[in-house]
Each structure stands twice: as C-alpha cells, then as structure tokens.
C-alpha cells in the first residue's frame, strides 16, 4: 500500500486531506509562508500519532506538527518541496482529567486555550496562560513555543505551568511522563526539553498543567506616563508594595493606541486633555482574594503616590467588569490594528527590565534617523521584560519601502538587543523566520549543543526539519 492508503486505513479517508482540502494547513495565518505537503493527517489518539510517525520514519518522510496555526515565525508551515506530511492535532482536543486537590488538569494538545480556560473557570480554578490568540491557539502549540502572554509576571511561561507531558518521539514510540508531581529529581528534566522545541524533538500529545485558585477580585487601571523610564519606576513601586498581587503590567506606546482608535473608532482612551498624548501607557491588573473595595483602595493609594512622585501623569481605575474588558480590548486590538494599517515588521524581544528604557530611547532615535517617516509602534509585557518592538508603514514611509528595508531593520534591532544582553525571541519562537538569526547571536558552542540534542532525539531529522536549527 502507498502512504496515503496506509493513512486512510489508519485514520479514515475523511482525516487524510489533499488538494484544496489541505490548502488551509499549508500557509501561516499572516500569509507570509506558503508550503506544500503530500497530505494533512488528523489523528484522534496518541496511538494514531505514534502510528503516523512510525510510518513516516520507515521511509524518512518529514513531519510537520500543527496546532491552531496561529504562530508568528512559520514554525508550523511545511517547506515548498511537497515531501512533508502535516500532522494536525485538532482532533486531540479533550480535557482528560481534573484533580482539584492537586490543582492540576490533564489536557490533549489540540484543545483550544480558551476552551481550557473556561473548563477550569467552571470548576473554580484558574489556568493563567492568556494570549490574544486564545480563541484559536491550542495547548500543543503553546507548549511547542513556550508561550508567555500577559500573566507571566505572576505565573510564569507555560514551561513553569507544565508538570508532565506525553510525547510521541521520532521513532514512533510513546513517552508517558504525565505525572502531576511538583518535585521529581530522578534524572534529566525531559519535559522541559520538549517545551519550546517547536516540534523538532517530539510531538506533544497530552500535558498535565498547574492550576491556581480562581481570584475572587481583580482591579484594572490604565495609566498615562511620561515615558518608558516612568513605566519601569511604576512597576518597581507596585512590585515593592503589593508583590504577587500584581498579575499583569503591559505597556503600549502612544502610536499603538492611536492606531487602535483610528482603525476601530468604537474604542477610545478614558482620558481628557493632554493625557491622551502621553508618550506611553501602562495597563496593570491586580488580583487576589480580598474584597474589591479593599483592592481598589490599595491601587488608588499607590497610583496617587506615583502621581505625586511624577512617575505618571494620569490614571483611570476600571469601575466595572465592562470597563476592565474595554481596557484589555485596547491592548488586545493592537496586533489587529497594525495588520489593518499595513504589512509591518515584528520583533519579539526580551531584555533585562532595567535596560528597556535605554533600548527604546536609542532604537527610536536610530530608526527615525536612518528611516525617516517610519512608524515605530512598540508594546508588550514590561513585567517580564518582553517587548514587541514593531515597526510599520506610514504616509511618509510606504509599505513596499518598509519591506525592502526589512533585513536592515531586523539587524539593527536585534544587534541592539544582543548588545544589551537580551534575546531576539521572547515568546514567539524561532521557526523558519529567525533560524538564520541564531547563527549571528548564539555561540558555536551553544549551537553545537543544540545540534547534539536534535541528533539524539531525531537522528533522521524528520521532525519539523528546517525549523529552529
């Protein structure tokens, strides 16, 4: 039997896609990468995934695992050769177990993040990973890219939230490491190798994840500041005074919110006068078990002190759930507004928080000098040092000119990040977009260790070849 016949026998004909049926799986959601494949297969069990891998391994056929296909670096898109088999995890979507005493949940890789959040919320638990794409991204993709999001400040990345994994390895074997232990010092931490490996070391099929008590109250505020240095000062003040009650601390340049309110006129900033033109805004969230009034009084006092100290120039505390959602909607609309504003250049960088004001000031100046008219629209998760330093077209700098300058801008931004001890990928991964960049910023020794790990786990290089390394 040929490959497709074997797959149809294993999965059923409806779950082996070719031609037009396969097309949606062969391009990334931004339309940047377009590939080809022999077929797209949709297994429903871990055993079926293992069967697919074993069959491909016997003929050294490359495999591209795919979750919600919401990645930003082309990590789930096959190359143009047409040799690969895309393995969509969409049918492995069940929540398999909930342990309230251990505060864990066991879930298959194809489960949509928002579905898991709601499942846990209905059981009075919090799964804290929160992303703009949470309505379509999947747990397997989150694990493969070590997703971060807006609450890393309090809860960490998904690597910190992962207690166990089930993985199909490159030889078609199943490793069951789903234990929900918080301490297990019996050798190498295999699960941490698979988290963040972008499907190049194994295919994650199921995970056991940490849960937390559902916060009883939250308080959200949108703050206008005089600059990034002021944002850092405010972050330090809040961390010093309230510690872990600070759940999120997001920052947005004025240009980002101007673009949001122009693209989506129904949204607006809750400020009057000069505060609307503040250079930077901070969106912060407190959560805890205390009553809403006490949490609000605490936040109001701290923001009042920050205003007197000159760290901020205005602030609005949300007075209802609807207003909290409106504040977060402003933040979450930035990526869509930038997409509507024209094809831009995205950077997902991490820096020591103390270095971010220096980086922003110097990078803004260098880009505006080298590329006059360029629109700089950074935003991100200041609480964990992750900035999405995006640049876009403007009436003075056309989209085609921006794309012609792509490589120069990439090098300028990433060289500056590297010089300050930062990373060129904080939460999006490497994929195929940044694969060549690693050679510029990783040492030969680091690359050699990474290649050794890849060779040990996938000696035939069939798992997501051409990605990461």
Image (cartoon, rainbow, N blue to C red):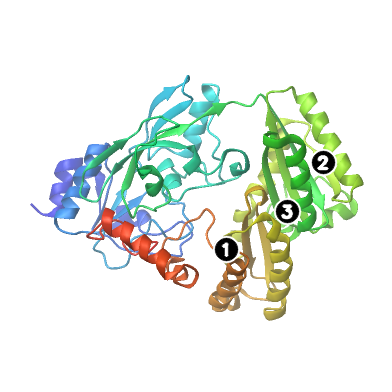
Q: Are there few (<14), some (14-19), or many (20+) residues within 10 Å of tag 3?
A: some
The residue closer to the viewer here, 276 or 310, is 310
Tell which circle, 3 or 1, labels the residue nearer the N-terminal end.
3
The residue closer to the viewer here, 341 or 358, is 358
Q: Dot 3 lies on which element?
A: helix
The percent position of residue 326, horizontal first and vertical second, equals 71, 40
Q: Which residue is mark 2?
A: 316
Q: Residue at x 70, y 36 (%)?
A: 243
In the image, which is nearer the foreground, mark 2 or mark 3?
Answer: 2
Q: Are there few (<14), some (14-19), or many (20+) residues within 10 Å of tag 1?
A: many
In the image, residue 137 above or below residue 321:
below
The percent position of residue 87, horizontal first and vertical second, equals 29, 49
Q: CA distance from mark 3 to mark 1?
A: 22 Å
In the image, which is nearer the foreground, mark 1 or mark 2?
Answer: 1
Q: Which residue is mark 3?
A: 261
Q: Which residue is mark 1?
A: 347
The residue closer to the viewer here, 396 or 355, is 355
Q: Residue at x 35, y 33 (%)?
A: 178
In the image, residue 202 above or below residue 393:
above
Res 102 visible = yes
In the image, which is nearer the foreground, mark 3 or mark 1?
Answer: 1
User: Which image quarter is the C terminus in?
Assistant: bottom left
Q: CA distance from mark 2 to mark 3?
A: 17 Å
The percent position of residue 404, horizontal first and vertical second, equals 55, 79
Tell which circle, 1 or 2, labels the residue nearer the N-terminal end.
2
- Residue furthest right in the image: 308
């Amino acid at each position: 039997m040929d490959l497709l016949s074997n797959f149809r026998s294993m999965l059923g004909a409806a779950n082996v896609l070719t031609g037009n049926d396969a097309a949606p799986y062969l391009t990334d959601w931004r339309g940047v990468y377009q590939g080809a494949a022999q077929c797209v297969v949709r297994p429903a069990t871990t055993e079926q995934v293992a069967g697919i891998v074993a069959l491909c391994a016997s003929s050294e056929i490359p495999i591209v695992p795919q979750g919600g296909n919401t990645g930003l670096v082309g990590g789930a898109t096959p190359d143009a050769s047409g040799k690969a088999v895309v393995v969509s995890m969409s049918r492995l979507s069940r929540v398999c177990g909930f342990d309230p005493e251990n505060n864990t949940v066991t879930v298959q890789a194809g489960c949509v993040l928002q579905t898991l959040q709601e499942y846990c919320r209905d059981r009075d638990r919090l799964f804290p990973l929160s992303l703009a794409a949470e309505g379509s991204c999947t747990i397997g993709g989150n694990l493969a890219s070590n997703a971060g999001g807006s609450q890393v400040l309090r809860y960490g990345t998904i690597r910190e939230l992962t207690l166990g994994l089930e993985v199909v390895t490159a030889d078609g074997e199943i490793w069951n490491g789903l234990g929900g232990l918080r301490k297990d010092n019996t050798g190498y931490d295999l699960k941490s190798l698979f988290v963040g490996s972008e499907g190049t070391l194994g295919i994650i099929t199921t995970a056991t994840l940490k849960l937390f008590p559902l916060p009883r109250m939250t308080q959200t505020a949108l703050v206008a500041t005089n600059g990034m240095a002021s944002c850092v000062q405010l972050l330090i003040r809040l961390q010093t005074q309230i510690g872990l009650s600070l759940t999120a601390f997001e920052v947005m340049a004025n240009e980002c919110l101007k673009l949001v309110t122009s693209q989506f006129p129904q949204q607006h900033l809750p400020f009057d006068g000069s505060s609307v033109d503040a250079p930077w805004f901070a969106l912060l969230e407190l959560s805890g078990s205390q009553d809403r009034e006490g949490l609000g009084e605490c936040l109001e006092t701290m923001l009042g002190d920050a205003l007197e100290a000159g760290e901020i120039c205005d602030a609005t505390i949300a007075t209802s759930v609807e207003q909290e959602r409106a504040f977060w909607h402003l933040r979450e609309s930035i990526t869509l507004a930038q997409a509507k504003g024209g094809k831009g250049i995205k950077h997902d960088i991490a820096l020591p928080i103390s270095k971010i004001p220096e980086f922003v000031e110097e990078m803004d100046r260098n880009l505006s000098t080298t590329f006059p008219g360029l629109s700089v629209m950074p935003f991100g998760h200041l609480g964990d040092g992750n900035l999405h330093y995006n640049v876009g077209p403007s009436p003075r700098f056309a989209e085609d000119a921006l794309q012609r300058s792509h490589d120069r801008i990439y090098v300028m931004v990433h060289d500056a990040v590297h010089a300050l001890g930062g990373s060129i990928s904080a939460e999006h991964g490497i994929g195929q977009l940044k694969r060549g960049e690693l050679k510029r910023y990783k040492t030969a020794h680091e690359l050699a260790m990474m290649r050794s790990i890849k060779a040990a786990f996938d000696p035939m290089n069939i798992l997501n070849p051409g990605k990461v390394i």
